[in-house]
């Protein structure tokens, strides 16, 4: 056969690349209950769809060519549920998947191709930081920038054109952390860790002894930093979460999210929705139950559910259309957002505005959480950042006042004067500057004696304020569009979404928040 020697050499090199770091390191990976990079790609993508690029890449350091198959990064394109995606997976069996010049160039090429061609990008992370000695010295450091005047910026920044997902699947220090902080969605597997520098480096550099879990385990990033949007029990669940998330997203910013058939049973709970809402105005309840009754059956995908629990952010479907939901959660802080909650919502607004997802707001809040700690966390500045983000949104906004909505939080939840397409209230709604009982305490605070007459006056003041806070006066002045029967909420939203879609643009927004930082 012609060119038999050349073909054998090609076969040998590709076989070497497929062996990754070799049998021992592959076994070590599997013994830890982890898949290899190539196995992860195979489990996530539709079978037989992976189209690899850069298989024969290797380190440019003399003598390292045979030791760095694919230069520790497996990259290419494939399909998830029939849609093309770009994918990069760190191969921890090759020098702990540390970053190098060649690997960085490969990652950058795939990322830019995804943006240019309109594909989501999925980054499967498990890696150490920059590779030594490659990055040492002035020449080594500067060369990681990619060799051009803007090449490092292309890799390490983004304006949202296509969705980006990062999975934290093992030790993730350096590059995987940066990719997580750039991503629209981050899922972290339990037992993994994410940070700028790992425990070993910290101990040697600043004498700080800390475990991976303490430094950047799933509880740290799901509950404290908010950098993890969802947590997975294991790798299989991680892949399922990624697939589900992408099912709500368009492939790129110039198309609508995909429509889906409405599942059987959707809306069956609407006749019983008032059984969820307590008759006592100050009693807590789980807003998630109301939301799940309204949306299509089973199609509710919370974002950051373990972080800033007094506000819910979730993707969902109503009548087959993708929506983004922002809802106060009375089960925590009576629904009062703290500064973490504000950051959580802004990040979600950015996601929805960037990818043409209409927003639904559900009010039940006494206002923002204020006080000394809040002021030290710049609550005023964050509230106005929230309002500024809200003002830049060009996707439809529909706002439903379920129960209480007081003070500045009313406007931040897309109240009157906020270009809200449809603003409606339930008959149970209360709207005012502060809770009537708080107002009464302020008014009567300087009274010297707590006499029966004063108590009666205070109770009458509260009753009058509650009556004045009802939705009918504001509906009468056309500051809101309607007061609706709660049982009709799903049908109202479905019709409102149809009306809101701009026929001239096809529902494609202006994406004014596409370059707003996603990580606070």
Image: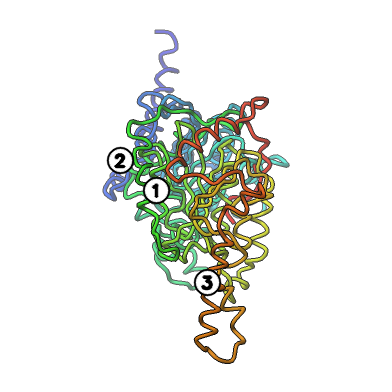
Image location (x, y in percent) of residue 70: 46, 35
Q: CA distance from mark 3 to mark 1?
A: 26 Å
Q: Could you tell me which quadrant the N terminus lies in? A: top left
Q: Position of residue 512 (x, y in %)?
A: 68, 41
* Mark 1, residue position: 169
Q: Residues within 10 Å of mark 1 (few under 14, many from 20)?
A: many
Q: Is disc 3 in contact with disc 2, using a CB cutoff of under 8 Å?
A: no
Q: Is residue 450 visible?
A: yes
* 23 or 467, nearer to the observer: 467
Q: Position of residue 26 (x, y in %)?
A: 32, 42
* Earlier residue among tags 3 and 1: 1
**Local secondary structure at mark 3:** helix
**For the view shown, which residue lies furthest in the right direction?**
149
- Colouring: rainbow
Instruction: State the residue position of label 3.
Output: 206
203, 269: nearer the viewer: 269
Badge 3 density bin: few <14, some 14–19, many ≥20, Cα 10 Å: few
Do callouts 1 and 2 mark residues in contact (Cβ within 8 Å)?
A: no
At numbered mark 1, what does the secondary structure look like: helix, strand or loop? strand
Which residue is label 2 attached to?
23
Q: Is residue 142 visible?
A: no
Q: CA distance from mark 1 to mark 2?
A: 21 Å
CA distance for labels 3 and 2:
36 Å
Q: Earlier in the sequence, mark 1 or mark 2?
A: 2
Front disc: 3 or 2? 3
């Amino acid at each position: 056969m012609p060119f038999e020697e050349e073909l054998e050499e090609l076969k040998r090199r590709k076989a070497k690349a497929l062996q990754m770091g070799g049998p021992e390191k592959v076994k070590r990976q599997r013994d830890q209950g982890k898949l290899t990079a190539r196995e992860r790609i195979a489990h996530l993508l539709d079978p037989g769809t992976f189209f690899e690029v850069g298989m024969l890449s290797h380190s440019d350091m003399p003598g390292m060519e045979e030791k760095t198959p694919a230069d520790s990064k497996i990259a290419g394109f494939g399909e998830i549920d029939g849609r093309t995606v770009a994918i990069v997976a760190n191969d921890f069996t090759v020098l702990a998947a540390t970053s190098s010049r060649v690997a960085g160039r490969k990652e950058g090429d795939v990322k830019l191709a995804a943006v240019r061609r309109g594909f989501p990008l999925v980054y499967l992370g498990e890696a150490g930081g920059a590779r030594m000695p490659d990055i040492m010295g002035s020449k080594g450091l500067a060369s990681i920038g990619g060799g051009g005047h803007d090449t490092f910026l292309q890799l390490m920044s983004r304006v949202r054109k296509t969705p980006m997902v990062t999975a934290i699947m093992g030790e993730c220090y350096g590059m995987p952390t940066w990719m997580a902080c750039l991503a629209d969605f981050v899922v972290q597997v339990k037992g993994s860790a994410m940070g700028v520098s790992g425990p070993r480096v910290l101990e040697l550099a600043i004498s700080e002894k800390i475990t991976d879990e303490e430094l950047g385990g799933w509880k740290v990033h799901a509950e404290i930093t908010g950098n993890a949007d969802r947590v997975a029990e294991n790798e299989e669940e991680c892949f399922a979460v990624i697939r589900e998330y992408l099912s709500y997203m368009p492939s790129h910013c110039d198309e609508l999210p995909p429509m889906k058939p409405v599942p059987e049973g959707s809306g069956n709970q609407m006749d019983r929705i008032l059984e969820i809402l307590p008759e006592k105005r100050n009693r807590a309840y789980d807003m998630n139950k109301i939301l799940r009754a309204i949306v299509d059956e089973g199609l509710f995908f919370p974002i950051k559910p373990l972080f800033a629990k007094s506000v819910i952010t979730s993707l969902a479907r109503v009548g087959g259309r993708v929506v983004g939901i922002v809802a106060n959660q009375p089960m925590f802080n009576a629904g009062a957002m703290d500064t973490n909650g504000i950051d959580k919502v802004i990040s979600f607004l950015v996601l929805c505005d960037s990818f043409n997802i209409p927003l639904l707001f559900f009010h039940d809040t006494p206002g923002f959480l204020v006080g000394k700690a809040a002021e030290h966390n710049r609550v005023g500045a964050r509230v106005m950042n929230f309002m500024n983000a809200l003002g830049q949104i060009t996707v439809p906004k529909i706002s439903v006042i379920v129960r209480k909505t007081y003070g500045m939080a009313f406007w931040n939840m897309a109240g009157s004067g906020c270009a809200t397409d449809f603003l409606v209230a339930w008959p149970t709604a209360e709207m005012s500057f502060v809770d009537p009982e708080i107002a009464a305490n302020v008014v009567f605070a300087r009274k010297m004696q707590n006499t029966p007459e004063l108590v009666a006056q205070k109770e009458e003041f509260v009753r009058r304020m509650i009556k004045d806070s009802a939705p009918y006066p504001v509906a009468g002045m056309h500051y809101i569009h309607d007061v609706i029967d709660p049982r009709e909420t799903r049908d109202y939203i479905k019709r409102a979404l149809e009306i809101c879609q701009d026929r001239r643009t096809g529902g494609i927004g202006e994406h004014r928040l596409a370059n707003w930082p996603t990580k606070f």
